Image: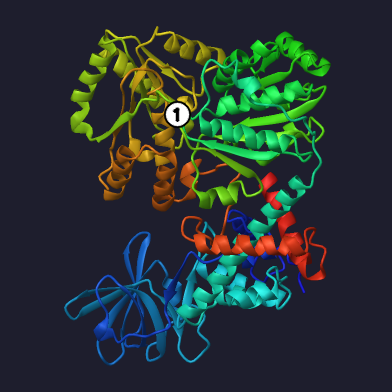
Amino acid sequence: MAELYGGIRFIKGIGEQRAKNLEKLGIKTLYDLISYFPRDYEDRSQTTALTNVIDGEYFSVSAIVATTPQNHLVRRGMELLKFDITDGTARCGVTFFNQSYLKSQIRKGETYRFYGKFSRSGNFITLNSPIFEKEGKELEMVGRIMPVYRLTAGISQKILVRAIRQGLDAISDGLPETIPESTRRKYGLIDVVAAYNLIHDPKSEEDIVRARTRLIFEELFVLSCALQQRKYAGTSQPGFKLQPRDPRDFYVKLPFEPTDAQKRVVSEAFADMSSGKVMNRLVQGDVGSGKTAVAAACCWFTACAGLQSAFMAPTEILAEQHYATLSRMLEPFGIRCSLLTGHMTKKQKNEVYESLKSGETDVVIGTHALLSEGVEFRYLGLVVADEQHRFGVRQRTELAQKGDDPHVLIMSATPIPRTLALIIYGELDVSVIDQLPPGRQKIDTFAVKEDMRERINKFIARLVGEGRQVYIICPAIDENEMMYFAAVESYYKNLSENVFPNLRVACLHGRMKAAEKEEIMRAFKDGETDILVSTTVIEVGVDVPNAALIVVENADRFGLSQLHQLRGRVGRGEHKSYCVLFNQSDTQESAQRLAALCKLSDGFKISEVDLTMRGPGDFFGSRQSGLPATKLAELSCDTNTLYAAQEEAKLLFESDPELKKFENRALAEKIRQFDDAMLN
């Protein structure tokens, strides 16, 4: 039997070039090949009489070739092969383009099965470039329910169908079973070999349903088991046991009174850190809910025990803001904070390195620079990662490895539906700050079309005249990054020179140098700029209480959760605030999505709408870190299956927490592969 994870070159018809082409589809091994599932199916199993075909639709017909195929040269580079077919009910003209070689394969008087898209005008029926096979032999591409695969140059449906069939024959019954027999019986799931055969070669719609049901359950079961294993490892892992402290000793020096939700989450984190086990906790909270204060309390608790904390933020702008905020909260306790970012001079970095190594710095706030080789801690007791989805699992792990099993606190301002949170953060304990501090302004939100442009511009001028400031957000309008930033700068130039020539307009985007971005944000925060034209770099940017309006261009290109975060840039002060969403799309779906955002202010409710309408990728962009790819499971649809898979995973780990039983060996190997994929 061929090795499941061996190469595919041994398969007949797969030479070096085709192997390279298949690699573009992510197919490198035999397992990749057989788990390259169809994106759709075409039912070619039932034949239809020619007289019953409908214009513009696909049918399978069994017909005799009524005329001798003839080649017709239309012009240089265009040759037609034409002939008629009949099944006794009607006649049909068939045409192939630039496939003159087929003339020798199609003979007058013989019967073939044809499948394709028919054109019909009254009794005049035509068929262009159909798939065909001779009747009387085993039909391979017609006469069956045909899987339809995503293709790439050099790889046809026929090549894939044959290769996958050979792959399935090669492994025979050698596919490892990852779902326990008791679970399969409980949920009526077919075995793994049957599932793979039926997904690629179904005889009925029922076969497709049975195969998909089994394979979707397997995906979510392996995923759930991988997360259960991580959680088991985390909860059984010894950690720094901090002596319990009353958090009120921290609250007393804060310039505000924490909300009940903040206090509850702090108590949950303190209990973790005092348990003797490593804390692995996610703090979820809407925009402005006060997550930073929770992190500050945990840093204080850690410093009281003589240990250091590392706070990692995704951008330099955000790291600098957190440094300023945490310093204000912690320095009254004599806790020393340092900032470490990539744009600092070598001398500045070395000073921070020394202070961390000596223990002089209690809390360091930084970007990916915290992962640098020069960063060594004396006693690292806590790792805080802000906006975790912007970091890969490996980066969080690398930072934690700079200490001896430090506690880990993860913060996310992206409200995530429970379904998705179970997948992304299944190995973590989750705390939710479900209460906003008093004084947060309600942000009136409007979705408008281009005919409102002049009115919105007048509104911008009026607000600025009242002393307020405005954000204008430009989306990526092209996949080419250079064109994206050029478009933002072009928009800014037109706005500053033609639309608002008398106002102070600035531009901010990700390709600017750190020092330049810092200066632009500082000027905006200090009120030296009226309008900031920006990319989504300000999505988790600095706090500007005087900003009262955010205008989002091409809002239809954004997900609702991202728009909600952008909206959270305003309404942070005492001034009435607004969000205007320009919708350039004419689709009903786009109008419905933006209308939902205008009505809703609860980020978690918005995220549920987002998940239902756009799917999980919308939360973090198309290549979000931390979200595993699934081949068949739809995270927004297969909720009940996910819950069932999670329950079965919990039961399995209660009986075999280290997966040492013989029947769980295949599952343990699958989890190892899953973890490797997640880390990379």
| Residue type at the position of mark 1 | Thr
Q: Secondary structure at mark 1?
A: helix
Residue at 55% x, 42% y is 624
Q: Is residue 307 above or below residue 424?
A: above
Residue positioned most to the left? 122
Residue at coordinates 68% horizontally, 26% vertically from top-left? Answer: 246
Q: Is residue 236 left or right of residue 41?
A: right
Residue at numbered disc 1: 536
For the question of whether residue 387 can be seen, the reply is no
> Closer to the camera, 38 or 124?
38
Q: Position of residue 411 (x, y in %)?
A: 58, 34
Q: Decide which of 578, 502 is in the foreground and name it.
A: 578
What residue do we see at 64% from left, 57% from top? 224
Near mark 1 (Cα within 10 A), the count class, few <14, some 14-19 or many ≥20, is: many
Decide if residue 153 is on the left or right side of residue 236: left
Residue shown at 60% from the left, 60% from the top: 220
Q: Is residue 522 visible?
A: yes
Q: Percent position (x, y) of residue 185? A: 63, 78
- Would residue 614 appear left or right of 445 to someone viewing this image? right
Q: Quadrant of residue 443?
A: top left
- Can you tell which quarter of the image residue 10 is in? bottom right
- Please tell me whether residue 220 is drawn above or below residue 202 in the rendered image: above
Report the coloring of the rendering: rainbow
Tell me if residue 22 comes above or below residue 68 in the rendering: above
Quarter where residue 41 is shown: bottom left
Compared to residue 20, the image places residue 465 above or below, namely above
Quarter of the figure that contains the N terminus: bottom right
